Image: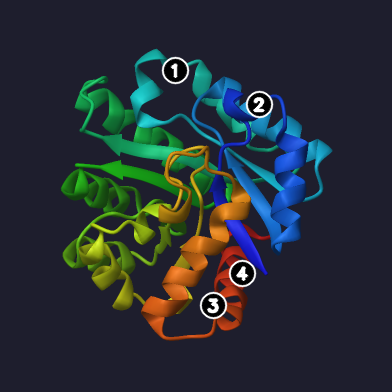
Amino acid sequence: MFIDTHSHLNFPDFNEDYPDVIERAKSVGITAILNVGADLSTSKRAIDIAQKEDLCYATVGVHPTNTNDLKNKDYPVLEDLAKKKKVVAIGEIGLDYFYHKVPREIQKESFKQQILIAERLGLPVIIHNRDANEDSLAILKETKAKRGVMHCFSGDSNFARGVLSLGLHISFTGNLTYKKNKPLRGVARGIPLERMLLETDCPYLPPQAKRGMRNEPSFLIYTAEELARIKGVLIENLGEITTKNAKDLFGL
């Protein structure tokens, strides 16, 4: 059994067939799917799906590349959404210095404000980090974020140690299976299983075996198989441990 801790069935890519996608996930042993908000609209959509589908849960948050449009009046709205039934985290939030779409100071302030919402509500955070390792760790330390996950991990061992030192989890997606990603597999080898989560980040980052296709939760099994191989454990054991990790972190 596995839990997809980061999915986007709340995105338009799945408007026409998300019930079928959920059924395929069930058929390969996915027992829960967290649909992650990227702005107020997709956060509301994640809640709507969670309240209709037993398998699904929701998170609410504003992705760093969307924070240019986030106003002070929106934070109370976000906090109210986070109190809805089956909302289990604040995310995805964080920093993205790759695209240069939003000034860094705006991203930082939004990251801090959303962490504070999570702390007030006792919820974990789901963190997006791209080319912002130092600032991400600094803000997490400053805000004393207690629980969360660095999603879609693609950093090096030094960054992994920094994340783990804060008590956070690390999550891997289909990029772990890519032929050119040997360094990331080396990083995964050194991370304790008790701090690992699995995700698809669908519709993005399909595993190597499904490259060119729309990613979906049922494809999580490919990442799980690769991670079990890397860690030298049976896939059943990997499923048991990562499922427990997800349940403990998100209160499922």
Which residue is denoted by mark 3 in the rendering? 238
Q: Mark 4: which secondary structure?
A: helix
- Between tags 4 and 3, which lies in front? 3
Q: Position of residue 117 (x, y in %)?
A: 50, 39
- Label 1 is placed on what type of residue? Asn
Front-lying residue, 214 or 201? 214
Disc 1 to disc 2, C-alpha distance: 18 Å
Horizontal arrangement in the rendering, residue 162 relative to residue 54 (left or right): left
Task: State the image quarter where residue 241 is shown.
Answer: bottom right
Which of the two labelled residues, at mark 4 and mark 2, occupies the earlier sequence position?
2
Check residue 243 in the rendering and tell me which mark sits there, or answer none. Answer: 4
Horizontal arrangement in the rendering, residue 112 relative to residue 15 (left or right): left
Which residue is denoted by mark 2 in the rendering? 44
Task: State the image quarter where residue 37 is shown.
Answer: top right
Which residue is denoted by mark 1 in the rendering? 72
Disc 1 to disc 3, C-alpha distance: 42 Å
Q: Position of residue 135 (x, y in %)?
A: 20, 44
Its colouring scheme is: rainbow
Q: Position of residue 131 (x, y in %)?
A: 19, 42
- Between tags 3 and 2, which lies in front? 3
Q: Residues within 10 Å of mark 1 (few under 14, many from 20)?
A: few
Which of the two labelled residues, at mark 4 and mark 3, occupies the earlier sequence position?
3
